[in-house]
Image (cartoon, helix red, strand yellow):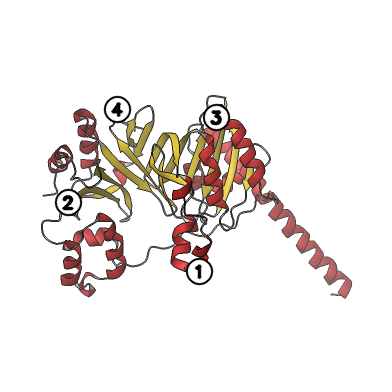
Amino acid sequence: MTLSKLVLSLLGSLLIANVSSAQAPANLAERWSTLRTEQPKLQIRDAARALGASEAQLLATNLGQGVTRLQADGNQPREIMRAALDLGLVQAITRNENGVIETTGVASKFKQAGDKSDQTDAKQDPEKEARERNIAGGYLGGAIDLRFHFENWKYAFAVAQPGRDGKLSRSLQFFDAQGDSVHKVYVRSEAGVAVFDQLLATFRAPQQDSQLNVLAAVARPAEKPDAEVDLKEFQLAWKEMTDVHQFAQILREFKLTREQALRLAPAGMVERVTPEALRTLLDKAAKDKVAIMVFLGNQGLTQIYSGKIAKTMAAGGFYNVLDPDFNLHIRDTALRSGWVVKRGGVTSIEFFDKEGTQVLTFFGVRERGKPQPQAWNDLADSLPRVK
């Protein structure tokens, strides 16, 4: 082959590669459009799975059509969430593989003196800097109660598109490195529209690129063999807990998965309940008006609801709480185990899926410094145990 023919051949190959690359998003958009026509009620997360893509990639196919990519490097996700405190009434939606939690309300702000997230000396202490980075000026307690892990936030979008009711819906949507949803914030008042528009203008990414370098799902690390666990020391550490929040440190210290730790807990500290106990718990909490705390999240964020619930029902393959300002949807057929757990003087109820991943946790609502209400303890005692 002559040099000129070789050059032409290489240029042709590059042209074909570029055309293929440019067509990939369009092809995905077309496939998604076809799927939506065939299954109009299909959720975007399930559509992404069916199409072999991520939810973030599907959303990115609509850039310029009501979807705007936002800056998401460094501390930008935190600053977006801080700005979102001014949206007023919002609906906050957080999900994992088998559960969704949706709360409508107004997020609380920290008082100026209590917001430490801008302290300059934090940069001199790496651990302190990491803690401060996960503060967004509010969301601690109140109607919208969130716990952030911004290090796992990768992509951000502002979305203004017609909803299923035909009305324009405005939302902020955040995703992790795998393109899975971390959190969504929907504007629920006219007063929030101007704030949303200003936020979009402030944080709009300079490059509106639909190509996302999403990563493959991270494989779950192998569980440490039970025989290698210092069982005596682990159980002693459990018994010496004075606060339930110390549990995370114990897991790290002994290198245990959460479900494994429950399995190896000291006698009398843990009882296993059936997966069906989830329905019993929700139904009884609604009937007896027992105030509960629900924790549901993913690697990037945990959302917490505190209060009483009213309406529970099975629908759409989920068991649901369907109240005006709070919805919970759990794919309970995916649950493998449930546990009543006693730590640091507090009783929780935790459910795990068939992969051993925690789906959600319940606590009884209590006043600071006081024990959990007897009604909560009675509810925990009433759940069906595994024989």
The residue pinned by badge 2 equals 272
For label 3, the crowd category at 10 Å Cα-Cα, with few meaning under 14, some 14 to 19 and many 20 or more, is few
> Amino acid type of disc 1?
Gln
Q: Residue at x 16, y 43 (%)?
A: 380
Dot 4 amino acid type: Lys
Whichever of labels 3 and 1 marks the residue nearer the N terminus, that label is: 1
SS state under label 3: loop
Compared to residue 5, the image places residue 341 above or below, namely above
Residue identifier under label 4: 311
Q: Please provide percent x and percent y for residue 303.
A: 39, 44
Q: Nearer the viewer, residue 127 or 220?
A: 127
226 sits left or right of 252 in the view: left
> In this image, 75 relative to 274: left or right?
right
Say which element carries label 1.
helix
317 or 356: nearer the viewer = 356
The residues bearing labels 1 and 2 have C-alpha atoms spaced at a distance of 45 Å
Q: Amino acid at mark 2?
A: Arg
Q: Are marks 3 and 2 in contact (CB under 8 Å)?
A: no
The residue sitting at 44% across, 63% down in the picture is 128
Residue 364, position as x, y percentages in the image: 23, 42
Question: Circle 1 is placed at which residue position?
Answer: 124
Q: Residues within 10 Å of mark 4 (few under 14, many from 20)?
A: some
Q: Quadrant of the N terminus?
A: bottom right
Q: Nearer the viewer, mark 4 or mark 1?
A: 1
